[in-house]
Image: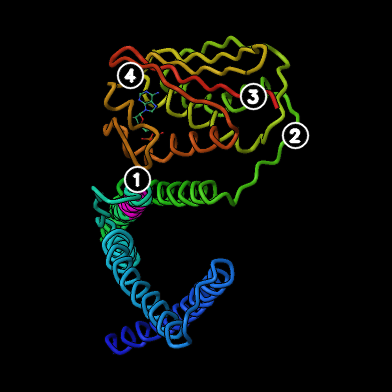
Amino acid sequence: MKNNSRIKSILQSLNHYLIFFLIIAFVITCCIMLFVTILQNTMGIKFTEDQISAAAKLTFLNVLGFSAIFTLLDGIRRRFIVIRPIRRIIQAAEKLSKGDFSVRVPRVHGIIGEDMFNQIGDCFNQLAQELSGVETLRTDFVANVSHELKTPLAVMQNYGTMLQAPELPEEQRLEYAKAITDACRRLANLITNILKLNKLENQQIYPIAAEYDLSEQICECLLQFEEAWEKKNINIETDMEDGVRITSDAELLSHVWNNLFSNAIKFTEPGGTVSVSLKNTDHHLIVKVSDTGCGMSPEVGAHIFDKFYQGDTSHSTQGNGLGLALVKRVVDIMRGEICVESETGKGSTFMVKLRRS
Ligand code: ADP
């Protein structure tokens, strides 16, 4: 079937070539005849009809023959210089479309136009690499979500079974019920965060910008954690300029402050300090959230904005590693910047730099 279509396409192109060559041979023969006639008239040379007809036939056949030879040579040249590299790219693209992201187009050497083919090959290889990265992220994401779902579900199943025991003391019944409620809350948080992140990443959330008082928003968000910081006896220090206004999406930015405050309090030992500052510079608004908590090593710091990454596993039950990924996405959408300075055992400072509008 494949051979048949190949023969058909060769015959078709031969047909086109034949018509083309016949026209060219005819035109050149006419030109030569015209030239011979002019030569005859101007120089007074006499050619017989037979001589002219033989010359015309010879010219016609020569043009036809040479055209065929050169076309054949050009076909061979194109086969090696053009068709072979293109075929390699097509084969690689076919493999890629079937899900083989490891495929790469090899570089070509020693042919005319190698730069262009290598450029196309490099672009293709980059595309394949990006796609393979996305695929890894996707599979990692599914694995992480499944793992995060399994843990609270296992807790609920175990405590649920234990709750069924007859004559369970009241104290234990309450303890098991609390464990189930906590696991449910964790599950709900996880799903809310996944959905939020998914929406943010797929651009389904369009920031609704409106002017509002950022100082007030930060204070309100901070106050929501009053119970938590009092429980751990954490000192709160603030250095905020009053009445700093921003034109932005208040709801999205509140996720940023809530996550940063929640982490600062979570990772700070009882009796430590959490400081919040807001500065209004010429072009930007700078919010810093510092703590005297456990801090983090540079290796941990390099991954904290990755989805599901948890550097400090001792607090893993209090989060799901999505908080800072969400924060980063929001700050990116706002075309702002976020960075962290941290030292193990001394504490961390998160700095968010935002445009005023
Ligand atoms: P979670 O808090 O749920 O673990 P996050 O995405 O908010 O997830 O944080 C990711 C990781 O970054 C944490 O597990 C922790 O290792 C590190 N981290 C974040 N904030 C702080 C902080 N203030 N101090 C020390 N480590 C932090």
> Secondary structure under badge 4?
loop
Per the rendered image, the range of residues in magenta is 124-138
Disc 3 or disc 4, which is closer to the eye? 3
- Counting residues from the N terminus, which is met first, the one under dot 4 or under dot 2? 2
Disc 2 or disc 3, which is closer to the eye? 3
Disc 4 or disc 1, which is closer to the eye? 1
Question: For the residue marked with disc 1, what is the amino acid?
Answer: Asp
Please tell me whether residue 83 belongs to the stretch shown in magenta.
no
Whether tag 1 and tag 3 are in contact, CB under 8 A, the answer is no
Disc 1 or disc 3, which is closer to the eye? 1
Quadrant showing the C terminus: top right
Which label belongs to residue 191? Answer: none
Question: For the residue marked with disc 4, what is the amino acid?
Answer: Gly
Q: Tell me if residue 291 can be seen.
A: yes
- Counting residues from the N terminus, which is met first, the one under dot 1 or under dot 2? 1
Report the residue marked by disc 2: 210
Where 52 falls versus 278 (above or below)? below
Which label belongs to residue 115? Answer: 1
**Cα–Cα gap, marks 4 and 1:** 50 Å
Disc 4 under 8 Å from ligand 1? The reply is yes
Report the residue marked by disc 3: 355
Report the residue marked by disc 4: 295
- Residues packed near mark 2 inside 10 Å, few (<14), some (14 to 19) or many (20 plus): few
